[in-house]
Image (spheres, rainbow, N blue to C red):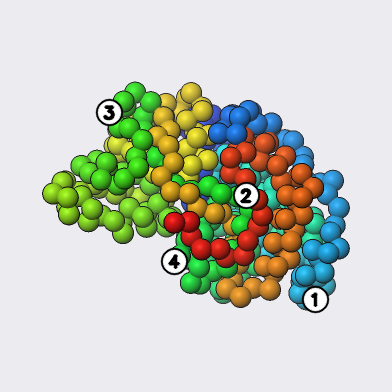
Amino acid sequence: MRTSTARRLLATTALLPVLAVAACGSDPKIASAAGAGGPAATATEDLVSGLAKSEAAAALLPEEVRRAGTLKFGSAFGAPPSAFYADQAGKKPAGIDVDFADAVARLLGLTVQREEAAFETILPSLDSGKYDVGTGNFGVTTARLKTIDFVTYIDDGQGFAVKKDNTAIQPVTDLLQLCGLTVGTTAGTTFETTLNSRRNVCADAGKKPYEVRAFSESGALLTSLQQGRVDVEMSTINGLRHQSAQEASGTRFLGEFHRLDVGFALKKGSKLAPAFQAAVNQLIKDGTYQRILHKWGVADSAIKESQISPPEHG
């Protein structure tokens, strides 16, 4: 953000699309904002460090990984509740993605080597071997499954938001409702793909097409919505709910559009998948999973069990 108002809003609001290409500073207090799951705890609550290694899950790791004892994570950061910096000065990571990555690593007896990366660079970097695992609230889609394997840990997806004083736009259940509007989203995400792949729906119905504006970072998208340069914002369900719960954001969540499983991203055919799946299922079994979701106010994003590369939700 470039204005003083925008910088203040970044410190008090939440916007984490699946995307966050640039990291945003955040005050830990905002992590207590309520999501659909009700009031959450704080960003400083530690639910991970006390976890013990699961010998059964760790036994599923490839031998060379057990010997190395570390995994390289490429991670996208933005704002609560998915992944952000609770302490901007110290660059202390926090969020759903962070807690689950650290919890799984604990159960597997591994150390996380986390590197911040631009959202759109992470998946290609898995194939090249730069990273072993990618996190960034990556939704499981049919297109991505062609080149990436996923180990699921939550259910999130796509939603819309508008300025709070915009009462003309109602919950979006069909893209035809966007005809004639300017829709803002973030570059390289499932949101941009969905909007661009279905641009024809308005013209086919004899209506003025919607315009898509893709932003490279989440703060710029929020500012554009606040200033009226875009009419509607498309992003993650959890991110938009959290954002709208912050009064200073001046936004209103319009509701869910399309649910998606979210998972750890792995190179296609990665031998890490069974161990990661076993670790997530252990977290579900021992209750840590539910405590993490409650911490971030996203209880309705719970899954019953982790899956490896399930089909995209219909």
Using the rendered image of the protein, determine whether residue 170 is visible from the camera's viewpoint: yes
* Camera-nearest label, 2 or 1: 2
Q: Which residue is mark 3?
A: 168
**Mark with earlier residue (2, 4):** 4
Q: Is residue 235 left or right of residue 150?
A: left
Q: Is residue 8 left or right of residue 27?
A: left
In this rendering, is residue 136 above or below 46? below
Q: Which residue is mark 1?
A: 63
Q: Tell me the kind of residue under disc 1.
A: Glu
Going 58% across and 44% down the picture, which residue do you hit? 301
**Mark with earlier residue (2, 1):** 1
**Mark with earlier residue (4, 1):** 1
* Classed neighbour count for the residue bearing mark 2: other residues with Cα under 10 Å, few (<14), some (14–19), many (≥20): some
Where is residue 102 drawn, in percent x and y?
73, 52
Q: Which residue is mark 4?
A: 143
Cβ atoms under marks 2 and 4 closer than 8 Å: no
